[in-house]
Structure formats: C-alpha cells, structure tokens
Amino acid sequence: MAIVSKPLVSPDTFTVAILGGGIGGLAMALSLATQVPTLKNITVYEQAPAYKEIGAGIGIGVNAGRILKRYGVFDAANAISGDRNGIHRSLRRWDNGDEIVSVSAMDEDEANGGVRQLSVHRAEFLQVLYEHIRYTTCAKLETNKRAVEIVDDAKGGKATIHFADGSSATADLIIACDGIHSNVRRQLSKATDMVPRYSGRVCYRGLLPMSAVEKDWPYDSFAISWLGPDRHFLVFPISQNKTLNVVAFVTKSEAELGDLKESWSSTAPRSEVETEFAGWEETVQKVVRSMEPNPGKWKLNDRELLDQWVYLGGKVALSGDAAHAMLPHQGSGAGHAIEDSFVMGQAVKAFFENPSLGLETYMKLYQETRLPRAQKAQLTSRQAGDVYEMQGPDFDGLHFDQRLQVIHDKFKDRMTWVWGHDLEADFIATRTRLGL
Ligand SMILES: Cc1cc2nc3c(=O)[nH]c(=O)nc-3n(C[C@H](O)[C@H](O)[C@H](O)COP(=O)(O)OP(=O)(O)OC[C@H]3O[C@@H](n4cnc5c(N)ncnc54)[C@H](O)[C@@H]3O)c2cc1C
Ligand SMILES: *[C@@H]1O[C@H](CO)[C@@H](O)[C@H](O)[C@H]1NC(C)=O
C-alpha cells in the first residue's frame, strides 16, 4: 500500500463556482452535493434577476430521469410532467395522419425503477430543481451575477471570476453552464465560431390548454409529429396533460428570415403558422387555430463541435449547452446537460480520493467520458431534423411512400443509444482506460 500523505486539498475548503443557473447549472449543483456531500462551498451564479425563466416544453429521456432519481428530484419532476402514454413520438403523415412509426419512450416498469420519460415546462422544472437546492441548502444561489471574465490566479492555484456588477469571486473549480452563448467558451476556447450556427429552420412555439383540443382527439397519445416536405409539426403534453406544447418547424433560408432576432422571446402572428401549415391534416389545423395570437418564433441554432472543454489546468470546465449546444430534434439537450452533471460529480469524487494526481487529470476524465457521446448527439440531432423533413441524399429520387419507409427505418431504434446507455459503466471504463 502507498503511504497516505496529507491531502493537498480537502473538500471542506474546496470552492466550486457554477456559472449559469439553467437546467445544467442547477443539476450540476445537485450532482456535486449528492455525490460529494463533504463539499461545503458550492455557489451558482446566475445572470438573471431570478431563477424563473421563460421557455416552453422540454423532454427529458430516461437516461437523465435515472440521474434525477439519484439526486432525489425525480418524483417532484414526475409530478409536473405530461403523460405520453409510453410513446416518445408517433410519427405521422402530414396529409392524412396515418402512422409512419411509433417511437417508444423506453419507460421503465415499476419493478425496474419506474423512471419514465418526462415532458415538462422548462420554468416548472427549473422551479423543482431550485426548490430542492433551497430546501436542502446544499448550494448557494446568487442572482444578477453576469460573469464577464475569468482570470487565472496562477500563484494561489485558483481562478477569479469578474461579474458585470463589478464584484468578483474566487474558486478552485469553475464550471461554466452558461448556455449556447457561453461567455466562458468565447473567452477561453480557440473555437473559431464566435456565434451560434443557424440550422436552416425556424420554429413556432405555442402552449395551449389541453381542453381546447382533447375532445375528439383521434390518437392514443398526445406526443405526435406530423411530417411533410420541408416542414414538421410536433406536439407533446406537459404539466400533467393540462397543457399541449406545440413546436412547428419550417425550413427557411437565412435570406428569408427578415429581421428575426435570435431570441427565446421573439414572436410572430398566428396567421404565419396558418399559412405555413395550410392543407395539413385536420388535427393540425385545430391545434393551430387554438394557438395564442402571437406564438413564439425562434431561429434554431446549435454550435460547431468543440474538442476541448477543460481550461486553465483543470480549473475551468464547460458543461451543457456551453460545451455542446445541439438542435432540439432528438429532445436531448437537457438530458445531455444532466449527464454532464452526473459525470462531473463522479470525477470530482474520484479527485478527492486521490488529489495528488491533480484536478486537471480528473477534469480530463470528465471530458473523455462525455465528449464523444455529446458530439454524437449534436450530429445526429442535425441529421434527425433533415430526416423529419425528407431532406438529404437518402431521399433523392424517391417518391413519397418510399420516403416514409426511409423515415420508418431511421427512427425505429434511433434513440436506444441515448436512453438505454449505462453512464456509470461508461465512466468506469474511461477511468480504467486512463489508468485512474
Ligand atoms: C430562456 C431559455 C428558454 C429555453 N427554452 C427552451 C425550450 O422551450 N425548449 C427547449 O428544448 N430548450 C429550451 N432552452 C434550452 C435548454 O434549456 C437547454 O438546451 C438545455 O436545458 C441545456 O441547458 P444549459 O443549462 O446548458 O443552458 P441554458 O438552459 O441556456 O442555461 C444557461 C443559463 O446560464 C445563464 N447565463 C448565461 N450567460 C451567463 C453569464 N455570463 N453569467 C451567468 N449566467 C449566465 C442564463 O441566464 C441561463 O440561466 C431554453 C434556454 C433558455 C436560456
Ligand atoms: C395523458 O394523456 C395520455 C395520452 O398522451 C393518456 O394516455 C394519459 O392517460 C393521460 N394522463 C393523464 C394523467 O391524464
């Protein structure tokens, strides 16, 4: 046995700063507090004046649901979820609603844990995470703290964050969960894409009371995507089936966008959606007519792949959308942010078991475990958007019925690698490979 020397660092005095209090940042705080309970100094710095946000429906697959269960928040999240009846998506024809393929949500039965796919309102889900942190006091939650710059304090072995209000904070580990526009990524990475990448699609977003459409609903699930050339129309239930979340996607070139800003809060008149989806199946028409007068209108963006998430000798790590912003076409962005949080917790725990190897070694372990999987999700999410709208070489020269067969084959088992994944085994395998 090696002689046990005095540890270089102890969790009692180790400070963690999490920049950004979205789903990724709050899950990160819960992960560290749950997996390294001896950590006493975890602070989340959110730029907004409150932990309440805009946003609409978000899907969270069972891969992430199993992690939420370990953090003790699955039941509360489940209670605010919609019920998809075990179906991730029923893909249907745009014109007559006939089913192309039904994609299972891969929910667990009660005997195997009872975790099911969640469909939540982003703001309600953030509230669940926020209240759990407040109740357990496992992390400090700051607001109005917009991080503008990180400075390496080489001598002290820490790094300092400067905020827009003139204040600053020092930490041993800074985890940047500051989203698709990440300031930290901009400052530290050598990436050449300084702004998000437009995907070639916009989406209209609506939230309508289920009571407006549920009568005579012709399908056995409210989780449906109608697919047509250059357009697709998605609905799923949130908030205990009380609300139907609507996302209507349309292919648009950059030139056709006019002055549409990249924003979570821009809107357009409903008549635009009516025009775009004129002639679609009657259920779609009914949903469109029930949308609010000015639904949201978003440019759909992601980021280029980034091969380095760890900076300043392991003192800074990117996580969630800051590391791997992806398109929503596989409903995976929140789930991958939650996976990051879990692996980061495991890595920090492993670091304290052998701190003499240095924090950077363990931050690399985090990156090596997560990066290949997250990048695969970025790429396959792009591809999924094209398949939904029958674009790309796989559809060239095919007539409509043949195209439906391609969609069927590509979606039947598409999500198994995401939802059926054993993340803990993945972490252990990477750790072994790196000799840790
Ligand atoms: C307002 C909003 C609404 C959204 N709505 C939807 C939706 O309806 N459907 C969907 O699928 N996805 C939505 N998303 C994206 C989705 O939340 C993310 O893809 C996913 O949850 C990964 O989350 P994240 O925590 O990495 O990033 P985000 O959810 O983007 O969270 C980043 C957080 O960091 C904060 N922040 C940013 N810069 C700084 C800074 N410099 N200093 C401190 N804090 C900072 C932001 O205010 C935000 O709270 C939304 C994101 C936002 C910000
Ligand atoms: C919610 O809707 C689904 C159909 O998507 C249905 O099977 C389920 O019973 C409903 N659940 C509740 C709680 O109303």
Image (cartoon, rainbow, N blue to C red):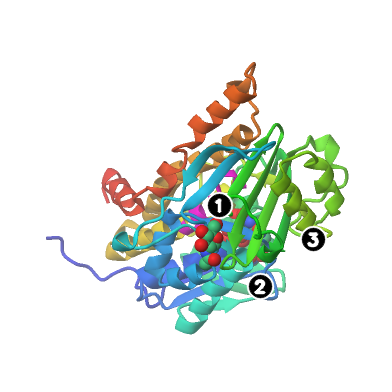
Q: Which mark is residue 292?
A: 3
Disc 3 crowd, CA 10 A, few/some/many (<14, 14-19, 20+):
some
Span of residues in magenta: 327-338
| Type of amino acid at the residue the image marks with label 3 | Glu
Disc 1 crowd, CA 10 A, few/some/many (<14, 14-19, 20+):
many
Q: Position of residue 183 (x, y in %)?
A: 65, 56
From the Cβ of disc 1, is ligand 1 less than 8 Å away? yes
Instruction: Locate residue 414 relative to residue 224 in the image: left or right.
Output: left
> Where is mark 2, residue-wise?
52
Instruction: Locate residue 313 relative to residue 422 in the image: left or right.
Output: right
Q: Is residue 393 above or below residue 341?
A: above
Kindly indicate whether the residue at mark 3 contacts the one at mark 2 (C-beta within 8 angstroms).
Answer: no
Answer with mark 2 or mark 3, whichever residue precedes in sequence.
2
Asked whether the viewer can see residue 194, the reply is: no
Mark in front: 1 vs 3:
3
> Where is mark 1, residue-wise?
333
